[in-house]
Image (cartoon, rainbow, N blue to C red):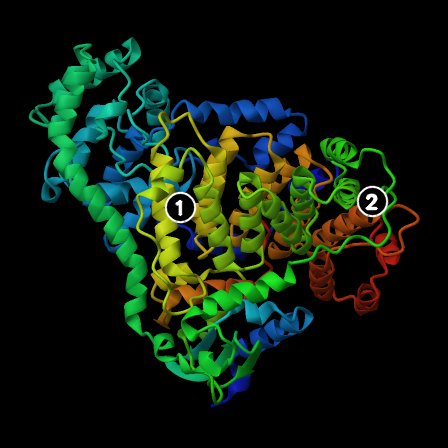
Amino acid sequence: MAALKPLLDAECGTTNPLIKLSQFYTRDNTLVTQDGLIKPATNNFTSANLTGGSNATIDELVNEYHRPIAAPNTFHLEGLLTGLRLADDALDNTNKHEYEWTTQFLDSFTNDFSSHATNVPKINNNFPSSVIHPPPNQHMQVPPQIMNDFHLQQQQQSQQHSQWMPWNEQTYIPPSASFPLNSNPIFLDQQPSTIDAGFDNDTVKAAQNILSLLQETQFAADTEFKSFVEHVAGGNGEKSTVDAKKQEATRDAKDATVDKWINEFSNELSNENQWQPDWTADPVSLSSLDDPIPRSQSWLRHLMDNGDNYSEYKFAQTNPFLDHSNPFEEGLKRLQAHDIVNAVLLFEAAVQKQADHVDAWLYLGITQSENEQDGPAICALKKCVELDPKNLQAYLTLASCYANELLTNEALDSLRKWLENNDKYSHLLSNRRPQAAVEEPRLLDELAFEELQELFLQAVSLSNSPSDIDSDLQVCLGVLFHLPGDYDKAAECFNTAVLAKPNDALLWNKLGAALANGGQSEKAVDAYYHALTLSPGFVRARYNLGISCFNLSAYKQAVEHFLTALKQQSDGIGPQGTHVQMSENIWRTLAIAIGHLQRPDLEQSVANKDLSKLLHEFQIE
Amino acid sequence: MPQEDLKAQVAFAEINKRAQAQPTLVKKVGAVIVFDITKGGNVQQSWTVDGKQGTIYEGKPKEGATAQVTITVDDDDFIQLATGQANAPALFAKGKLKVKGNVMLAQKLSTLFKEQSKL
């Protein structure tokens, strides 16, 4: 851990300012231009939070993250209002309007994640209203008044934050799962059956506050918002009245809009097909294969071909644990102690002793994946589901491994199996028509993707309260979004998962990977730091950390991280192992990083995999 | 048209180097993607990433291969893309990158330009 401090303090911090600047451009402009729109510092991880705390315990960090769970609502008042102010400023208005807001609404499900508030203004622009009533063409006049009302001074966000944060964080929790990815982000929510009975005093008081402010101006005299607030202020929190109110106010609007949004979003995806279906006109090249699988099913062949690569697990040639009396138990212990490499060997011994040991195969797969060996991981996990076709954890891990290997259709398949075998959600599938045979082979089977996306969205909306986060479901969603390259959404999902399980190093690593692949290398580094603090032997996280350093042009650090990872892998085998299973990926990336260091003398060592020489060269003990 | 002036030339050489170290890299892209690199508004040179054959070369797709996606981008912006300083969706949103064909197939391109972090 101490080794990582200099990383965060000094060198990785002094990144090329141009890269930093360009990173801003890869994110939404409003995030930059509006000061305090969302404070990244209040977000989960910055260098400041972390370096100050190499003394900060995990508990402190955990407490930081727990807090936001209390305010998971997508209705973020000050965000909404700032958004209105943004609209008023008319800075980037055209961009916002062009932006396909349906995609944005899907982004808006998490509470604290940075892109959230930036999405809110977009939603507000197109929003068919039930919250702030004046029709869209008038909404430009609205903001100043609201701003005046709700901010007793015309000051900046900082004031506003402290003033209104308590209101937000308090117990007004939108009745149904507006968290996360609920179809309707407004707090006047639609699903009547899931409202918690009554509102508590704090909410009532807050509502009274707002009401008095509203009444001070004549603005919003007739809005539904105001009448709703009146309701709440009257302490009249009964389910039925609010229900009735909300239902009539929003039901039709909601059904139409929700369907519209979902449709728009799916249309967005399928629109792409209409542009230039060159590839649909190109079946010829596919039919050059003579085997019995028909052309229309060449995706099946593709699946089967890849299946061959992962059919047989290749065990380590020398395994000191083969005679161990209880390798599985010992493997679990080593895993607890973060000794990944030896855990792998122990699990291998366990399955060699007992070939139908489901959990041993499962853990072997998971651990190999942590060990940056997705190939063996996939083999092991496939064995596991052969023996236990309902093993959810195996499917989840398989999906991540396939995603890493860019085998997107296999990943989709694994995600689907997770859903099918999950008692909480399998009923969603029974409502589906059976999937039609795919006509054309696609890289990413878009129909399957869209269908799975919709299913997962439904699954998420099943959760009864915003604090009830199914982190596995979030991981599935994250992997799903990661497949077509939607890294920002993927990162938000993983962030949500991490909120529920802040001590799970694997989740931190996934978060980091999604951030890194989306170009946010600095944030990724923070996430990896978390993962490695929790699990110092986590080879994959260290490898990813090296990659992020590389992307930040910190080549020397990158090399050091790669070498440390390789050392951890080779240490595990012990002195008698001549055939050391080190990860090809790490060697390959090490080679590229060394290339950037302009040290041709070292390139030969890398080619020879002369680890000890390299370790010596970089003074890694 | 002097191709030596194109920075994309250097970028593609780098990518090729990486592809040689990792033989399955280009195949993982899976589709035939053509880059039309422009400078000063006109297309100067094209490169083909043949994800089916696993090759990258200068020029339009050879006999037997059809472009499934064609990306038109300026030389400077392409360098931004190739070095990971900008990502395709952002460039696309700014109108600096034009895509013809199935844009979903282009999602895997990022794996060519930089190392993928692992979930």
Helix, strand or loop at mark 1: helix
Callouts 2 and 1 in the same chain: yes
Helix, strand or loop at mark 2: helix
Q: CA distance from mark 2 to mark 1?
A: 46 Å
Other residues around mark 1 within 10 Å, as few (<14) / some (14–19) / many (≥20)? some
> Which disc, if any, is residue A44?
none
Other residues around mark 2 within 10 Å, as few (<14) / some (14–19) / many (≥20)? some
Q: In the figure, is residue A6 to the left or right of A411?
A: right
Q: In the figure, is residue B98 to the left or right of A614?
A: left
- Coordinates of residue A551 in the picture (x, y in percent): 60, 56
Q: Nearer the viewer, mark 2 or mark 1?
A: 2
Residue closest to the eye, A612 or B93: A612
Give me the chain letter of mark 1: A
Residue on which the image places disc 2 = A572
Q: Amino acid at mark 1?
A: Val
As displayed, is residue B21 above or below residue A391?
A: below
Q: Which of the 4 image quadrants contains residue A245?
A: top left
Residue on which the image places disc 1 = A32
Q: Is residue A296 visible?
A: yes
